[in-house]
Amino acid sequence: MQLYLFISLSLFFTYGHSKTDISLGYQLTVAVPIEYSLGFIGRAFLMETNEITPTFKTALSVEAVNDKYSCSLEVFLGDVKVWNSGHYSKFYTSNICVLQLTQDGDLKLKGPKDRVGWRTGTSGQGVQRLEILRTGNLVLLDGLGNIKWQSFNFPTDVMLWGQRLSVASRLISFPTNSTSYYSLEIEQSRIALYLNSGKWNYSYWEFKPTKNRNIAYVQLGRKGLELFNDKLKKIAQIHPSDHQTVQFGQPLRFLALGNRTGNLKLYFYSPSIAKFDVAFQALNTTCDLPLACKPYGICTLSSACSCIQVLIAENETSRSGNSDCSQGISGGFCGNGKTKAEMLELKGVGSVLRGAPKIVNVSKEACANLCLEDCNCTSALYSTAKGGMEVEECFLYGMVIGVKQVERGSGLSYMVKVGKGAHGGHGKSNLKRWVLVLVGVVDGLIILLVFGGLGYYLIKKRRKQTLPNGHNN
């Protein structure tokens, strides 16, 4: 283990930092440990831009992932990874990780026995060298300096200054230990953030140009994310507020879609703290994040997570504070053995997820029935939004996620599908019993306060009438 780490560190020092390009026939090898070691990273830096800190660097990396070792070509801005060849499909290898720029101009990652795990597919196109540009764009150039392949055409979860994304392109980030993923989508009428899970995809943030103007592409400028039309005219911009711009005084360096929260952030480099800091973020409230809580959890007004308690079987596990909010939920609503279901209503609860199928001018009961009749539906949001006139809307969801508590009187009612009798017939009755007890206690306190106050007033008044001149002794 120490030998391999020593080899990786030796490679870091062996290949010059000032080198910005490599030529045909170049080959670099990083050794891969024989035994798996959690957290291992072996990295050899081969190119670096000539500019002030922080600089762009290109590295060949070996990393321990999912009990295996991945081999990838990476680009760093300072200590931040801004591009990775294995972002969407990892190349797992053993013994060795090899980077090769062949004589016919193809850039490859290889493992043992010349097994190719990744390539640019540029052989026979006149490629002469691989270069890292001052923008962080990794490019293959021919003898005339024409770009034959570039990393900017294969965006991951980061967008660098000067990089363009056209309509229908996107950034994607993958949360750890999750089957869902986030995406930033460039659409004709807007840019939007999405939560994707299986066949479901819901937006949770959007930005639209005014006057319904169409977008052709977006580009990260020094002061913000700029939106352009097909005539190359800037039509809108997302940028930090004025006081932030004055305070920071630094150009933006990159945009990133976080793999933990799914939030979109713009970053600048702060020389005073010698690291990157946030200049803008799309979502400023925890409960507006799609995965702020686990499935079947509610993000409360205090930004804490609470399970939908009436959906959890009343056992020792749930009482011990287990964080799995889906425990006790009955599934199997689709298929031959369909489970009979019912809808449990949660008033004052909404969802951050948008883009769900919408039905208008339906009652709350009809909305619930629409979800019950659709075996793929797991929850429904009923809204009686008032904008001059009351409009009834019903949204059907395929997942119970992104649920948050809202202020009273919002006109929202969130309904969750559960198996009928899934809790031994006690779930719903316990909820009703709890509500009745709560209402009884509150009503009792109100009655006690009213009659107690009235009695105190009458006694005090009678005492005053019995005293001379109405004065106390």
Image: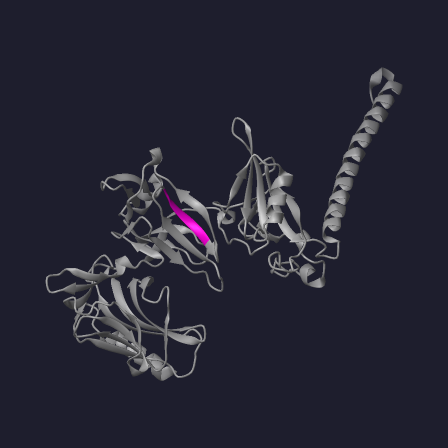
Residue 110 appearing in the image: yes
Give whichever of 259, 125 is nearer the camera: 125
Q: Which residues are magenta?
A: 190-195
Where does the N terminus fall, quadrant-wise? bottom left
Q: Quadrant of residue 467 in the image?
A: top right
Residue 54 appearing in the image: no
Q: Residue at x 57, y 51 (%)?
A: 377
Residue 193 colored in magenta in the image: yes
Give whichever of 147, 360 is nearer the camera: 360
Q: Residue at x 43, y 79 (%)?
A: 36
Give whichever of 222, 361 is nearer the camera: 361
Where does the C terminus fall, quadrant-wise? top right
Q: Residue at x 65, y 40 (%)?
A: 365
**Residue at the right extreme of this rendering:** 466
Q: Is residue 405 left or right of residue 185?
A: right
- Indicate how the structure is coloured in the image: one colour
Q: Residue at x 57, y 38 (%)?
A: 383
Q: Is residue 220 left or right of residue 195?
A: left
**Residue at the left extreme of this rendering:** 144
Residue 360 percent coordinates (x, y): 54, 36
Q: Quadrant of residue 262 in the image?
A: bottom left
Residue 221 percent coordinates (x, y): 27, 47
Residue 401 percent coordinates (x, y): 54, 52
Residue 380 percent coordinates (x, y): 58, 46
